[in-house]
Amino acid sequence: MRLLVIGYGRMGRLVDQLSESYGFEVAGRLDIDDNHAGAGITPARVRDVDVAIDFSTADAVVDTLPRLAEHGVNLVVGTTGWVAEERAMRKIVEDAGIGVVAAANFSLGVNLFLDLAARAARLFEPHEEFGAWIHEVHHAAKVDAPSGTALALQREMARHGYARTIDMASTRVGAAPGTHTVGFDGPSETIALTHTTRDRATFARGALEAARWVQGRHGWFSMRDVLGLDER
């Protein structure tokens, strides 16, 4: 399988480094210097490319995706910040008949953890003696608190029926990796689920897994589709 890497920052380089272990040959690498306004997406560049992975910028995505669609190249998008353009991008994908997996977080563990937390919330909802809480820990340099993942956990728990308050706490300290804990506390017992990220490679691995999965598919997909969570 031939892969085009779009955006060659930290994530793009990790995708490149790990690609061979997922069965990919890197057919090309595009960054801001050679892909301004999508100019790097040419017939010669995408010839025989099976799928592209984009960890570039929001502005670049809305230029690059239509050009890839013109050439029938499926795409995995890990770039965020272009939600205002999503409807237009979906229409382009539909008209071109390509497949796109778009996600804000490609960690397989985080996406499974979100589903576990939602299912746990549904189980605990009828038992009013149990209160729910979320605690997340990140390094001191992380500005946003609570984290996007913590907020996603809260949303998923509420969406699956947990109507009571979910207490949220954030810690910013040292060089701590991202850790998220969802807990349910009752009169005599506590149940806790924890996910810890050790390095950014988890996001590259998830994107490569999505790139393998989207081969031969047509439509707009999420990591829930890649993991088959709605089928279970």
Image (cartoon, helix red, strand yellow):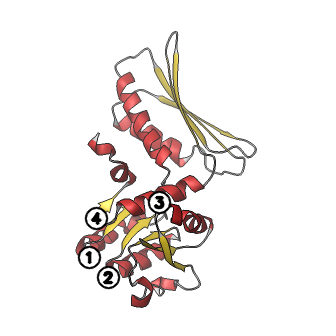
Determine whether 86 is above or below 181 in the image.
below
Q: Nearer the observer, disc 3 or disc 1? A: 3
Q: CA distance from mark 3 to mark 2?
A: 22 Å
Q: Residue at x 41, y 59 (%)?
A: 210
> Which corner quadrant holds the N terminus?
bottom left
Residue that carries the numbered disc 1 in the rendered image: 96
The residue nearer to you, when weighing 188 against 73, is 73
Question: Residue 217, how many percent across, how many down?
Answer: 28, 64
The residue nearer to you, when weighing 194 against 217, is 217
> Which corner quadrant holds the C terminus?
top left
Is the C-beta separation of discs 4 and 1 under 8 Å?
no
Question: Residue 74, how many percent across, how many down?
Answer: 35, 71
Residue that carries the numbered disc 2 in the rendered image: 70
Residue that carries the numbered disc 4 in the rendered image: 217
Is the C-beta separation of discs 3 and 2 under 8 Å?
no
Question: Residue 60, how many percent across, how many down?
Answer: 49, 76
Lower position in the chain sequence, tag 4 or tag 1: 1
Determine whether 79 is above or below 29 in the image.
above
Is the C-beta separation of discs 4 and 3 under 8 Å?
no
Residue 163 seen from this side: no
**View extreme (right): residue:** 174
Q: CA distance from mark 4 to mark 3?
A: 16 Å
Say which mark, if any, is on residue 69.
none
Q: Residue at x 49, y 70 (%)?
A: 58
Residue type pointed to by label 1: Ala
Q: Residue at x 33, y 52 (%)?
A: 225
Lower position in the chain sequence, tag 1 or tag 2: 2
